[in-house]
């Protein structure tokens, strides 16, 4: 009995110590889990800052309807930009994490090793970007461009298309005066009569067409061997941490593109669709149907095939052309590291 009492006396402190240790460990585990959940909650509540431009495409309807926020369950702050070069600068600084740019700005940015990747193709560009000549300029044919002033946002898809068109027409670049203006500046210069032509997109395109004539557009230039694309790109650090958001973003976009592709006529007959696109892009509602029809919107299978197929080569070809024109300083061996199709759901 005495031995039992001695053993009990010695054992009790050990048991109490063990209980205390277990309690402390449990508390630490619970606290870490709570902190992790809090961090995740804070991260999820932090707005995703996205740069968009004023190109005309069906996904603008999803943007206007708040579908990206609804499907991703995230708050989104949309920032409008006038040119792809401005979007690239915002991506580089971290001011935005997703951006809508063209294939030419992507090629230039990727050549500078900016850590971004394309994950979605909004459209293969066509009539939504065009070279318009002023009715006052006297330009009737491509050769009439010689000696004239042409405005274009530098290192944009329209810049690439303009240089490609001049090459196709055998017009040396130094035989025309090409000036760097953003779309709003192009509209102002056009109104003043300071420029003879402009290769641009909406809403400046419609304003120029009101007193000008289309000499060529990106659909035709693409057929000459220089296709251009409207894209969504993402910072790689954001992509690694937010795959579910990007999957939801892709799904939302493709659903809207598919609605248009299934019945374009019915889509543009819906005045609500037209009005929402016009409001976000600044285009005239009457021009929306024609502008939408000028581009090609790739479905899921086509997206996958293009991104996994020739797209990295397309970026390389674009960068090589820009380097030849003195618009980029260096080329990478390949651009596969700037293409990511993993967010396309099967």
Image: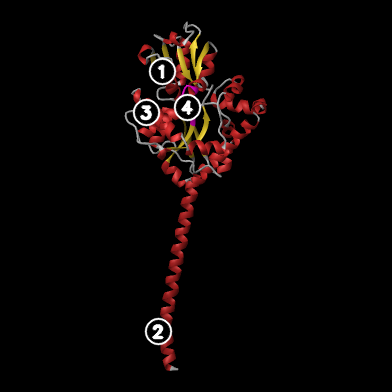
* Mark 4, other Cα within 10 Å: few <14 / some 14–19 / many ≥20: many
Element under label 2? helix
Q: Image check: 216 left or right of 114?
A: right
The label nearer to you, 3 versus 2, is: 3
| C-alpha gap between disc 2 and disc 4 | 82 Å
What is the distance, in whole Å, between disc 3 and disc 1 at their CAs? 14 Å
Q: Which residue extends farthest left?
A: 329
Q: Is residue 227 magenta?
A: yes
Along the viewing direction, whichever of 309 and 287 lies nearer the viewer? 309
Residue holding disc 1 = 167
Quarter of the image where one finds residue 31: bottom left
* Above or below: residue 310 compared with residue 161: below
Whichever of labels 3 and 1 marks the residue nearer the N terminus, that label is: 1
Residue at the disc numbered 4: 228
Front disc: 3 or 4: 3
**Residue beneath label 2, please?**
10
- List x then y, in percent, for residue 324: 34, 24
User: Which residue is painted at 50% across and 35% down in the image?
Assistant: 306
Check if mark 3's residue and mark 1's residue have beta carbons within 8 Å.
no
Pinpoint residue 29: horizontal percent, then vertical percent.
45, 63
Q: Which of disc 4 and disc 3 is earlier in sequence?
A: 4
- Per the model, the C-alpha gap separating discs 2 and 1 is 94 Å
- N-terminal label among 1 and 4: 1
Q: In the rendered image, is residue 141 in sight? A: yes
Question: Label for residue 320?
Answer: 3
Q: Which segment is the magenta one?
A: 223-230
Task: Say which residue appears at 47% left-offset and 47% top-offset.
Answer: 43
Across and down, in percent, residue 311 comes to 46, 34
Mark 3 closeness class: few <14, some 14–19, many ≥20 residues within 10 Å: many
Of badges 2 and 1, the one in the foreground is: 1
Tell me, what colour scheme is on the image? secondary structure
Quarter holding the N terminus? bottom left
């Amino acid at each position: 009995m005495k031995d039992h009492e001695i053993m009990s006396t010695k054992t009790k402190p050990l048991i109490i110590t063990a209980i205390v240790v277990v309690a402390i460990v449990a508390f630490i585990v619970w606290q870490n889990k709570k902190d992790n959940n809090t961090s995740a909650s804070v991260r999820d509540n932090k707005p995703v800052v996205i740069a968009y431009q004023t190109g005309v495409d069906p996904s603008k309807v999803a943007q206007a309807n708040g579908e990206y926020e609804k499907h991703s369950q995230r708050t989104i702050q949309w920032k409008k930009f006038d040119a792809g070069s401005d979007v690239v600068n915002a991506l580089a600084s971290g001011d935005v994490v997703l951006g809508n740019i063209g294939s030419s700005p992507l090629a230039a940015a990727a050549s500078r090793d900016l850590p971004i990747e394309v994950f979605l193709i909004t459209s293969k560009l066509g009539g939504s970007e065009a070279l318009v000549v002023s009715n006052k300029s006297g330009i009737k044919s491509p050769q009439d461009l010689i000696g004239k002033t042409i405005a274009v946002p530098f290192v944009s898809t329209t810049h690439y298309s303009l240089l490609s068109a001049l090459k196709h027409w055998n017009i040396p670049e130094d035989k025309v005066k090409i000036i760097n203006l953003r779309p709003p500046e192009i509209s102002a210069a056009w109104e003043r009569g300071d420029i003879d032509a402009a290769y641009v997109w909406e809403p400046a395109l419609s304003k120029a067409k009101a007193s000008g004539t289309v000499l060529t557009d990106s659909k035709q230039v693409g057929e000459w061997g220089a296709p251009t694309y409207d894209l969504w790109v993402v910072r790689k650090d954001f992509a690694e941490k937010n795959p579910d958001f990007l999957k939801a973003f892709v799904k939302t976009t493709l659903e809207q593109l598919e609605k248009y592709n299934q019945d374009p006529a019915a889509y543009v007959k819906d005045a609500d669709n037209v009005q929402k696109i016009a409001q976000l892009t600044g285009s005239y509602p009457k021009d929306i149907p024609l502008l939408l029809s000028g581009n090609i919107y790739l479905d899921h299978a086509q997206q996958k095939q293009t991104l996994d197929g020739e797209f990295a080569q397309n970026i390389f070809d674009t960068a090589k052309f820009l380097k030849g024109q003195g618009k980029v300083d260096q080329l990478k061996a390949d651009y596969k590291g700037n293409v990511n199709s993993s967010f396309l759901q099967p």
